[in-house]
Amino acid sequence: MTRRRTLLQGGTLVLLLGRQHIARGAGIVAVRIWPAEDYTRVTIESDTALKATHRMVGSPPRLAVDIDGLELNPALRELVAKVRADDPNIAGIRVGQNAPGVVRLVVDLKHEIEPQVFTLAPAAAYQHRLVFDLYPANPVDPLEALIAERMRDLGTPRAADPGAPDTLGELIARQIERANGLARPGGDAVARAPAPPPARKPPASGGANRPPPARTDRLIIVALDPGHGGEDPGAIGPGGTHEKDVVLQIALKLRDRINNTTVGGSPMRAFLTRDADFFVPLATRVEKARRVGADLFISIHADAVPHPNASGASVYALSERGASSTAARWLANKENDSDRVGGVNVAARDQHVQSVLLDMSTTAQIRDSLQLGAAMLGPIGSVGRLHKRSVERANFAVLRNPDVPSVLVETAFISNPEEERRLRTDSYQNDLANALISGIQKYFAANPPLARSREI
């Protein structure tokens, strides 16, 4: 009788709780949406792996996703409220119980998209993730947008002479031709590319007789790469500061300075691999710089180590072989792990980009990268302490671009409480931006773009 009474009480409790209170299948840990012009990411994090099928539905465009092993719950309903009105890609999300154990998400879209739906195994602080990456089917060409933006800022009308080199159409065509030549290893355009220039002679002392930099007659493009973003917060300081946030602010401030600077009479323009809080795979960062035909690539980070007393800034260039120090090797391994934390769709990853060959031009690229890094160290050292007074080297994935001088700048140790505090201030971010633009100008003063045979 006692056993029967216990069972009956238990059954009554189940009826009172109701179906929505009973744990069924996977438990939802969190839901997140990362909107950006490049793409919008929707993430469902759960305590066990989820399985999903998806299909596109016609006009108006919608993405329907059926997730197995779930019952509708309040956590999933949070996705509806997380859609921002200014999301470039998502108009809204609807959720419902499509069948027992199957939840359906319908993503209403603002335009045609090319979806990628995939799962990620647990990594870093994350458990299992189901990810929807929603890419515009007709993305804006980044180079054309960059040049058009520059022309709008200058208020430059199209020239009356159709052959004038500063007309928007001509400039876009020439710059795209140049970028395509750099971005197609093994193609005809690369076969026509000039050989790396001979080693330069050091400038005469005093610099009084140094010839002025040659005019380039084109946009000088500097690719800025704020590290991490979106699902990948980067290092987290003792006060809770995320690396991804402070380096983006520094990059935005540096962008403003670059956009108001000229080189040999030609305008400079900054191109950001990300201009908001979203994740960009390492290889995609490199490919973005190649697509716009960047003259320089500067990746911006804020280091973290287990020892809170470590301090100072560092500049790194690529090493094809071993790292210049144990610390440099450790840092490169940590930064190269960003793809695992941020979450890359391995099935859709461009293997061609992943296997960019470090060809004969890599020697010249590393030489120029070391010169760029050396030009930056002095100005950075005037802002704060240098952790290393020479350019270090390691095999950073984000620096593997044989065409473009590339450096990775560790602005400070975010793991140091004092440096974390400074990194969060506008004044220190402005000081760092001023130091970086000073280093860029110093590099171009000694290495004009045309002297590197990188003319259009």
Image (cartoon, rainbow, N blue to C red):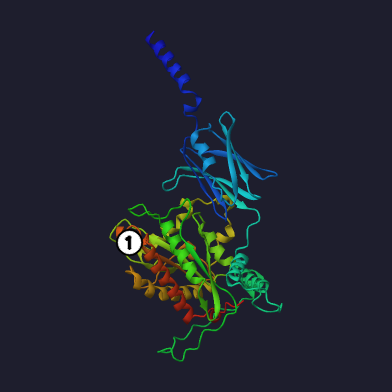
Q: Quadrant of residue 380?
A: bottom left
User: Where is residue 134 shown, x and y percent of the image?
Assistant: 59, 49
User: Where is residue 175 shown, x and y percent of the image?
Assistant: 62, 72
**Which residue lies at the image location 55% right of the left edge and 38% below the top edge?**
51
Tell me: residue 326, above or below residue 17: below
Local SS, label 1 = helix
Residue 242 placement, left or right of 213? left
Q: Residue 312: in sight, yes or no?
A: yes
User: Where is residue 288 shown, x and y percent of the image?
Assistant: 56, 63
According to the picture, the residue beneath numbered tag 1 turns out to be 419
**Which residue lies at the image location 49% right of the left edge and 29% below the top edge?**
24
Local crowd at mark 1 within 10 Å, few (<14), some, or many (≥20)?
Answer: many
Tell me: residue 223, above or below residue 442: above
Q: How many marks?
A: 1
Q: Residue 324: in sight, yes or no?
A: no
**Placement of the C terminus among the 4 image quadrants:** bottom right
Depth check: give the residue in front, 164 or 368.
164
**Which residue lies at the image location 45% right of the left edge and 63% below the top edge?**
396
Type of residue at label 1? Glu
**Placement of the N terminus among the 4 image quadrants:** top left
Residue 412 placement, left or right of 97? left
User: Where is residue 124 shown, x and y percent of the image?
Assistant: 42, 48
Outermost residue, left direction? 309
Outermost residue, top direction? 1
Tell me: residue 279, above or below residue 392: above
Outermost residue, bottom direction? 209
